[in-house]
Image (spheres, rainbow, N blue to C red):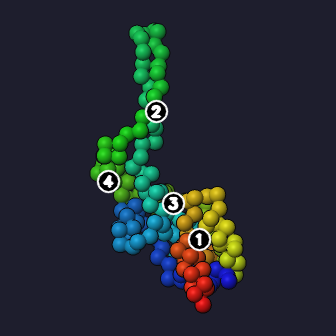
Amino acid sequence: MQARDLMEPDVKTVAPDDDVADVFKKFARYDFSGFPVVDDEDRLVGVVTESDLVDLFEPDDETLWIPIGLPPFVDTLTYQVKAPWADLDLGVDMVRNADRPISEVMSTDVATVTPETDMNEVLDLLTGDDPNINRVPVVDAEGRIVGIIARQDVIRAFRDKRLT
């Protein structure tokens, strides 16, 4: 069995210049946790996931320095602070990030396969050391997206093969 036998050929994608707000709408509309990002010629340039967008709303620096003593004898204590999700101002963050192009948020180091890739290689990618790989784009020799394989596609193929 090859990737072409497992892949879904109707791939929902986003463009690098789509803004964050538009991609949020796509996540609400479709039951996917990530979208391939393709250029005008359908060449894969990256992937954007829900966690990429969630990262926009997490503080970059969770370290709090507290001065102790009086100048000039000031020392500091360092604490790691994890603000509760409810305390973050999502409205302000959404407005601040809504117009950002997805190209600033997406991952560009994307694992891909070709239609001829053996199913064992696909399985290795989906069950490997990187827990963030939930789907694998299928690209042709020019890097154009021709399909996508999600974990459930592989499970479904095993089930169907077992039933026959």
User: Between marks 1 and 4, how big is the CA–CA gap?
Assistant: 31 Å
In-front residue for pair 89/142: 89
Q: Residue furthest front?
A: 163
User: Between marks 1 and 3, how big is the CA–CA gap?
Assistant: 15 Å
Residue occupied by mark 1? 136
The answer to which of marks 2 and 4 sits earlier in the sequence is: 2
Residue at the spot 70% in from the left edge and 78% down from the top edge: 118
Q: Residues within 10 Å of mark 1 (few under 14, many from 20)?
A: many
Residue occupied by mark 4? 95
Residue occupied by mark 2? 80
Mark 1–mark 3 CB contact (< 8 Å): no
Task: Give percent across and percent down for residue 109.
Answer: 61, 60
The answer to which of marks 4 and 3 sits earlier in the sequence is: 4
* Identity, as a three-letter code, of the amino acid under mark 4: Val
Above or below 78: residue 87:
below
Residue 64 shows in the view: yes
Mark 3–mark 2 CB contact (< 8 Å): no
